[in-house]
Image (spheres, rainbow, N blue to C red):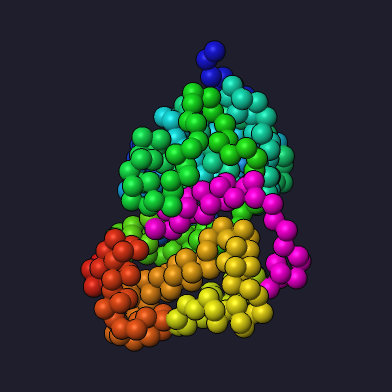
Amino acid sequence: MQPKQPTTNQEKILWIERDDNNFTSIETLPAEFLSMAFPYAKVYFRQDEDCDTLSQNIKLPGFSIWCHDIFALNDIILAPKTPHQILALHFMVADGIVADIFNRGEFLLGEKEVNLFNLHAAFHTAPVKAGNQICSFHINILPAALPDLIKQYPALQHLSTFEIGMVSGPLNKSPYKISAACKELITAIINCRFIEDQAKFFLRRCCADLYINFACQDRLSGVTNKMSPATKETLKEIFDHLVENVQEVFNIQRLAYLYELQITELNTGFEQLFFITPEAFAHQQKMMTAYRLITTTKERLGAIATETGFDNWHALKKAFEAYYGCTPASIRHAQ
C-alpha cells in the first residue's frame, strides 16, 4: 500500500525532518514572528489563507530539534512527513489533535503529553480546527544512531528494549504526561540564545536529558504510585528547592530532615514523580547554571564553583567536562 499524498487545499505538508537548505531568510520573517525565532535554528515559514506555520530546526550530533507553531485560520489537515525513518520524542505543548498514522490508524496527541514515535517516510494526517494553535516540539534521532547514544549515555539503555519495526506509531504503550523536569529542559531549549559551539554543547545535553527522562518514565510506567497528595506536594517543594538552591552541596540526609521524609521515601517518590533521582536533578541544575555563568559572565571559575556548590574550580571543571563533553575555558571563548 502506497502512502496517500495530500490532495486538497486544506491539506498542508508539515516536514518533521528534512535534509535540504530551503529555509526562510530571517530577514523575510514577518515582524510578529521574529520574537519566536531561535538564534541557532534554521527557520521554515509558510503563510496562506488557511494557516501560518513556523517550523524551526536545530541539527546537533545525534539529535535533531524541531519546534512547530501552527496557527489555523481555517479548518486544515496537517500532513506530517519525514524523508526517512526517524525516532521522534514528541511533546505536545499546546492544543491536542488526533493524528491518523499511516498503516496504524488514529492516535490522540493529547495536550501536555509525550510519546516516542517510530515514523517511516509516509504522509500521516491530523485535522486541525480553525482558531486552534498547535505547538509541537520533538527531538528526532536516527534508529541506527541509538546504539552509539546508549554507549555515550548508559541511562538510555532502556530504549534498547523497544521493538523498532516497519510500522509507524508510538513505541510506548500509552501516552505520558510531560514531567516537570522535562518542562525545565524544554524551556531551557526554547529560551536558549547561544549560537555555534556554545549552543551545540548545551542543547545536545538537554536533548540527551529529555530522552533519559523519557526512558525512566517508560521504565517506571508499570510501578504503582501510592504517594499521598501531601507527599506529592512535599516532593514538588523539594523539586523547587533544588532549582532555587544550586549553591548548596547536595545532601539527601539534610533534604529528608528539612522536609520530614524518610530518605527512601524521598528518593523513590521523587523519581516516580519527576523520572530523575533527586541527586541527578540537583546535578543537572548545577551544570545548567554553571554553563550559563561561564558563557554569559566574566566570573572566575572559582566563584562559579562556589555558586554551584562545588568545593573548588577543579571539581567543577571535572564535572563540567564529564557532563557537556567540553572544557569551561573552550566554551567561554567559543562563538
> Does the magenta segment cover residue 220?
yes
Q: Residue at x 44, y 39 (%)?
A: 160
* Residue most extreme to the right: 229
Snapshot quadrant of residue 107: top right
Residue closer to the observer: 317 or 268: 268
Q: Residue at x 41, y 80 (%)?
A: 308
Q: Residue at x 75, y 71 (%)?
A: 230
Snapshot quadrant of residue 307: bottom left
- Asked if residue 213 shows in the view, the reply is yes
Q: Residue at x 68, y 45 (%)?
A: 110
Residue closer to the observer: 69 or 116: 116
Left or right? Give the position of 322 relative to 91. left
Question: Which stretch did the figure color magenta?
Answer: 205-234
Magenta: main secondary structure equals: helix
Q: Is 78 located above or below residue 309 in the figure?
A: above
Q: Quadrant of the C terminus?
A: bottom left
Residue 44 x %, y %: 45, 44
Residue 211 x %, y %: 48, 50
Q: Quadrant of the N terminus?
A: top right
Left or right? Give the position of 174 relative to 288. right
- Asked if residue 335 shows in the view, the reply is no
> Does the magenta segment cover residue 60?
no
Residue 117 x %, y %: 53, 37
Q: Is 293 located above or below residue 220 in the figure?
A: below
Left or right? Give the position of 282 relative to 179. left
Q: Is 38 located above or below residue 262 in the figure?
A: above
Residue 80 x %, y %: 54, 33
Q: Is 39 located above or below residue 245 in the figure?
A: above
Residue closer to the observer: 327 or 8: 327
